[in-house]
Image (tube, helix red, strand yellow):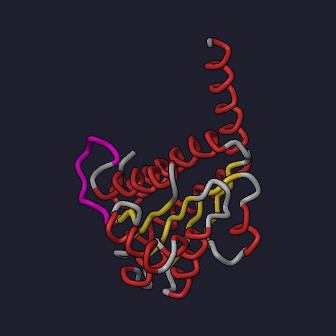
Amino acid sequence: MHNLVRDHIERSIDVKKMLLEKETDRISAAGQALAELMQKGGRLFTCGNGGSAGDAQHIATELLIRYRSAPERRSLPAISLVGDAAAVTAAGNDFGFEYVFSRQIEGLGSQGDAILAISTSGNSANIIQALHAARKKHMMTFVLTGGSGGQIAKEGNLADHIIVVPTAETARIQECHIMIGQIFCAIIERQLFGFE
């Protein structure tokens, strides 16, 4: 068991080192773009499936409620599209699961807002549809993915900012996604409120 624990921790460290080498500039640029958008009053919508849905809720909550316990700051407009069970199940039932997020973006999103879409594979149909819907609304688009970046990376025009975690191992990708989300929160708090 000891070796299993060490192996997981070492693989996590290795992926984070690769992320540090390959994606630091993209993470910084994306975080700064999010901060500028929120400074102008834009809202952030987040979405994902499974563990990525949990990450989407987590990141939105960090912004809406608080990232750090001190110092105090105002709430920021971040909305998770995964949390409204009635909307998700109605869209899934009436239109199909691939439209559970895009339907919400159609109704709630506006120019000047942004979407942070999380897909470990980059192939999730409902994430791709949400990005298309955001494009139609002239929203800024941010994507966290992994491996090759999947269909989202292939299409090339769906994301203004795409960060690809350089591994195919889902658990390691998800660990990095939540870390990146928290880095975004730290960048936003520094730019908007001067927090160190």
> 43 or 35, which is in the foreground?
43
Quadrant housing residue 160: bottom right
Residue 86: image location, x then y, percent: 32, 68
Q: Is residue 76 magenta?
A: yes
70 vs 46, left or right, is left
Residue 162 appears in which quarter of the rendering? bottom right
Image location of residue 101, percent across then percent down: 47, 72
Pick the residue in front: 20 or 172: 172
Quadrant where the C terminus is found in the figure: top left
Q: Is residue 88 above or below residue 55?
A: below
How many numbered marks does the figure carry? 0
Q: Is residue 84 above or below residue 131?
A: above
- Any magenta on residue 194? no
Left or right, 155 with respect to 106, comes to right
Task: Identify the residue at horizontal 53%, vertical 87% (top origin).
Answer: 136
Q: Position of residue 111 (x, y in %)?
A: 44, 85
User: Which percent across, then down, holds residue 131?
Assistant: 56, 75
Q: For the stretch drawn in magenta, what is the main secondary structure? A: loop
- Residue 151 lies in quadrant: bottom right
Determine the residue positioned at 52% across, 57% down.
49
Report the side of 190 relative to 20 (left or right).
left
In front here: 62 or 48?
48
Q: Residue at x 76, y 57 (%)?
A: 148
The residue depicted at 67 percent of the width and 61 percent of the height is 122
The magenta span reads: 67-77
Q: Nearer the viewer, residue 47 or 32?
A: 47
Q: Where does the N terminus fall, quadrant-wise?
A: top right
User: Which residue of the protein is positioned furthest toward the top in this rendering?
Assistant: 2
Q: Is residue 183 above or below residue 153?
A: above
Picture layout, residue 67 above or below residue 136: above
